[in-house]
Image (cartoon, rainbow, N blue to C red):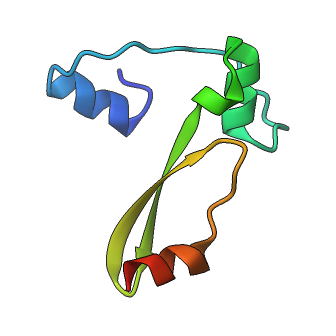
Amino acid sequence: MARTRAIAVAEQGRVPFRLFEYEHDPGSRSFGLEAAEKLGVDPARVFKTLVVEIDGKAAVAIVPVQAELDLRALGKARR
């Protein structure tokens, strides 16, 4: 059984991917930074994909794990 919906979709579509696993700390404040640290990857090479809704429309933002998404700036960029 797939661990996430994204994995299930990739498997169904026969999309090749490589899964990197680590033991998650429930007390961690940043999943992305935790993943980078535990996998020994430079955080500058790790990104998070965020899906938001602005004015009733979906928008996708790809942001470095050490950054936060400014929803106001994203909304202004779409206008």
Position of residue 45 relative to residue 67, above or below, is above
> Nearest the camera: 37 or 11?
37
Residue 70: x %, y % from top left: 63, 70
Residue 8: x %, y % from top left: 29, 30
Residue 34: x %, y % from top left: 75, 29
Could you tell me which residue is drawn at 75 percent across and 42 percent down? 30
Q: How many marks do you count on the picture? A: 0
**Residue farthest to the right, as pictured:** 27
Q: Is residue 72 left or right of residue 36?
A: left
Position of residue 14 relative to residue 57, above or below, is above
Q: Is residue 28 left or right of residue 12?
A: right
Q: Is residue 5 left or right of residue 25?
A: left
Position of residue 11 relative to residue 59, above or below, is above
> Nearest the camera: 45 or 58?
45
Could you tell me which residue is drawn at 70 percent across and 51 percent down? 67
Q: Give the image quarter of residue 15.
A: top left
Residue 18: x %, y % from top left: 39, 12
Quarter of the picture holding the C terminus: bottom left
Position of residue 9 relative to residue 56, above or below, is above
Could you tell me which residue is drawn at 48 percent across and 80 percent down? 75
Quarter of the picture holding the N terminus: top left
